[in-house]
Image: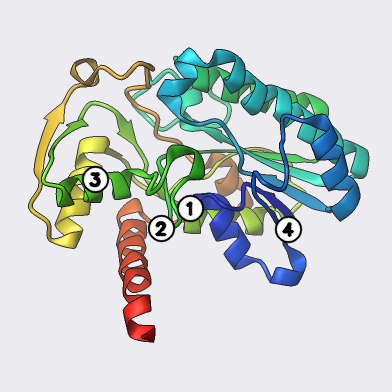
Amino acid sequence: MMVIGAGGQLGGNLRRLLPAKDCVALTHADIEITDPKSVSQVFERHQPDVVINTAAFHRVDDCESHEERAFQTNAVAVRGLAQACRASGAVFVHFSTDYVFDGVQTEPYLETDRPGPLSVYAASKLAGEYLVAATHPKHFVIRTCGLFGLGGSRSKGAGGNFVETMLRAAAQGKSLRVVSDQVVTPTPTADLARKVLELVQTDAYGLYHITAQGSCSWYEFARTIFEFVGVQADLNPVTAEAFGAPARRPRYSVLRNRHLELLGLDDLPPWEDGLQRYLAERSRASAAPANSA
């Protein structure tokens, strides 16, 4: 099994769950997915049976001013990986986003609901979905939402998830303005990785939603983080319009794991449970150097 993007949050969890002998873990230094020659060389060298691609250009606001790069990485390069998988007979696993929806609904989106991307990032990810489906029958395209995991996200910088951003800002004594009118499902990458590895043992190829259970606004997520760690933060709700991010985001992008339900595999825990486990693991990881001294 080959994991592309093994240095990121989700890729790191996948790497840790797989036996070393069964996992080819590739970072950006090992493969450039936008370079067909690099992709061809990697596939020839490793001859994978399953390829899990977690690499993406997912700085949502930056995509607005780097449209060509967004589509090259999130769509064109993804098609190239799907073509390489088809040629070699490998199963292809690719990740997409809740942001493919426009947020008009007030109940969780199903895999069969019509997308309506509001941003360059969302459009590029949706294009990637379509290209995978059109290129290689043996695929799993997985939409997910609000990811957080140990290791951060390389392309978002150190500590590149919402939990770390909130904790770091509070530790610096900053006043925090967090959007209160966008509803999502925070999802720990550890839980997502476990479910992905379970899903690829089947041949039920297609499109899936995989998120934790429940939902909240970003403001409610931040408030819960501080409650769980016992931090008094200067936290203030703000509307998305007042916050003024360059890229539009859906007001409601909660996903229902309907296709997992049909397989009897939708047993992911509530997001609050995942957050508590994440914070506990984070605490253990920060204490480890002192304990080993």
Q: Are marks 2 and 3 in contact (CB under 8 Å)?
A: no
**Mark 2 residue crowding within 10 angstroms, few (<14) / some (14–19) / many (20+):** some
Q: Earlier in the sequence, mark 3 or mark 1?
A: 3
| Residue 189's disc number | 1
The residue that label 4 is drawn on is 201
Alpha-carbon span between mark 4 and mark 3 = 36 Å
User: In what element is the residue under mark 4?
Assistant: loop
Residue occupying the point 62% across, 19% down: 71
Camera-near label (4 vs 3) is 3
Q: Are marks 4 and 3 in contact (CB under 8 Å)?
A: no
Q: Quick one: 31 or 183, which is closer to the camera?
A: 31
Can see residue 116?
no
The residue that label 2 is drawn on is 269
> Where residue 27 appears, x then y in whole percent?
64, 49
Q: Earlier in the sequence, mark 4 or mark 3?
A: 3
Can see residue 253?
yes
